[in-house]
Image (cartoon, rainbow, N blue to C red):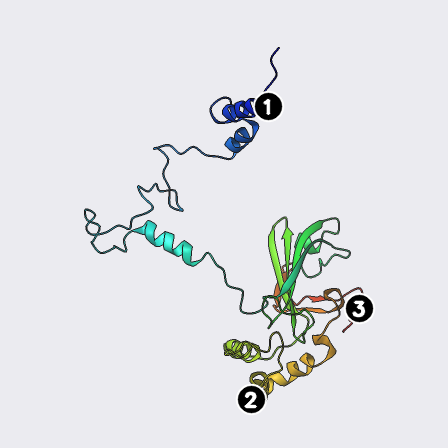
Amino acid sequence: MSVPNPLMSAVDKVKNMVSGEKGRKISQLDEFCRTVSKDDRITTDSGVKQSTADEWLRVNRDDKTGPMLLEDSYAREKIHRFDHERIPERVVHARGAGAFGNFRLFESAEDVTFAPVLTDTSRETPVFVRFSTVQGSRGSADTVRDVRGFAVKFYTQEGNWDIVGNNIPVFFIQDAIKFPDVIHAVKPEPHNEVPQGQSAHNNFWDFVYMHEEATHMYMWAMSDRAIPRSYRMMQGFGVNTFTLINQKGERHFVKFHFTPVLGVHSL
């Protein structure tokens, strides 16, 4: 009568996994592995096969000492992709939060438009909305004194429709050419990156002092409207003016305002 050797049994299992029938682990790995044959080649973004991905096209390929040619479109594409791998945070509205939901119409607006999303009360439209502060970078606080922006995307059956707005109906500037200036004024000092997400520094006050048109917005920004308690407790004012057309062909200029059911409350 022979006694089974546990050591030999373990060795046999290893042999079966390596050289015999594949074990379950290797079989599972095979499902996610790709066998590359000599006929497989790397391609460009447009699907053109490449002979190599390791050598730049040169004037002299024999000793690989010739100058590299800009006509190597794959090499330029590879470098372009590398340069764009890390997407920097947006200049403004970097700090935010988003949510999916549904838009339901309770009263038809057929007197100003024939768009089904605003006239068909039986329709339910998926939406996505993103709220954000303006000045702060990623990681800044949600409670800073700042304008709150938002963007609503309606996924209508006819196509996507976007509404962009702020929680304050006016702005610091009248002429768009000053937009880089006002953003530079409210952003942190470039040499030390402070203060973050707020306007408590000299650049902002210098801008307000030198631009009288910013006074109205400044009064709003220093009020309780700039420190909302929640995104659900602030008003929204669409930035753009839309031209809507009804069934009669009549045109109407329209701006969209959002009124919170919970009311307007501040910190």
Q: Position of residue 147 (x, y in %)?
A: 65, 73
Nearer to us of marks 2 and 1 is: 1
Q: What is the C-alpha distance between the residues marked 2 and 3?
A: 35 Å
In-front residue for pair 110/98: 98
The quadrant of the picture occupied by the N terminus is top right
Mark 2, residue position: 210
Q: Residue sitting at 32 percent across and 51 percent down?
A: 73
**Upstream in the sequence, badge 2 or badge 1?**
1
Question: Residue pushed farthest bottom?
Answer: 209
When asked about the image quadrant of residue 28, the answer is: top right
Which disc, if any, is residue 125?
A: none
Is residue 250 at all visible to an observer of this figure? no
Pointer 3 residue:
263
Regarding residue 6, the answer to whether it shows in the image is yes
Residue 168, percent from left and from top: 68, 74
The kind of residue on which mark 2 rests is Met
- Tag 3 or tag 1, which sits nearer the N-term? 1
Disc 3 secondary structure class: loop
- The spot of residue 201 in percent (x, y) is 59, 83
10 Å neighbourhood of mark 1: few (<14), some, or many (≥20)?
Answer: few
Q: Residue at x 69, y 75 (%)?
A: 226
The mark found on residue 6 in the picture is 1
Q: Amino acid at mark 1?
A: Pro
Q: Residue at x 62, y 82 (%)?
A: 200
Q: Residue furthest top?
A: 1
Give SS at disc 1.
Answer: helix
Residue at 80% over, 68% down: 263
From the viewer's perspective, is the residue at label 1 or at label 3 nearer? Answer: 1
